[in-house]
Image (cartoon, helix red, strand yellow):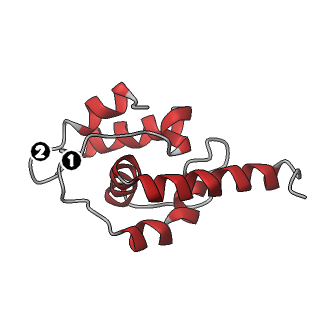
Amino acid sequence: MCCIELLQLLKSLDADGNVSASRGSSIIAHIRSCPLCRSGVIHLPQKLPGRFLLSCEQCRARFPAYYELTRPEYPLVEMAEEEIIAMVLHLGQCNECREEYQELVLLSELEERDELA
């Protein structure tokens, strides 16, 4: 599944992956408001700019902060725009990290609803 709006925003990155302040803010606002992007289930083409590339280890280390950041009601942490974009790009292109992140989201939501047995 791919979010067309996010894809259009990400295509505005230049060849080096640079993003203007206003475009970065638009990307962050979209991620926070779009249920699909917030869930981490998006798939992105492999040919997006690479300046923000993360290793799987780096991505997984940021899972908790990214999860908290994407909660629309109460984002409890802050991340730099570059880190958020890097997470979106990595989760959109790495099946393994995306699956692990989706499991974290599911478990966290169950825990928040006190449904975790």
Q: CA distance from mark 2 to mark 1?
A: 7 Å
Q: Position of residue 114 (x, y in %)?
A: 88, 52
Q: Amino acid at mark 2?
A: Asp
**Mark 1 secondary-structure assignment:** loop
Question: Is 105 left or right of 109, judged from the image as shown?
Answer: left
What residue did someone put label 1 on? Answer: 19
**The disc label shown at residue 95, or none:** none
Q: Position of residue 24 (x, y in %)?
A: 30, 44
Question: Is 6 left or right of 30, judged from the image as shown?
Answer: left
Q: Amino acid at mark 1?
A: Val
Asked if 74 appears above or below 2 in the picture, the reply is below
What residue did someone put label 2 on? Answer: 14
Q: Are marks 2 and 1 in contact (CB under 8 Å)?
A: yes
Quadrant where the image shows the C terminus: bottom right
**Mark 2 secondary-structure assignment:** loop
Quadrant where the image shows the N terminus: top left
Which mark sits nearer the N-terminus, 2 or 1? 2
Specify the farthest residue to the top: 4
Q: Residue at x 39, y 31 (%)?
A: 2
Q: Position of residue 51 (x, y in %)?
A: 18, 59
Q: Position of residue 10 (x, y in %)?
A: 26, 39
Question: Is 56 left or right of 104, judged from the image as shown?
Answer: left
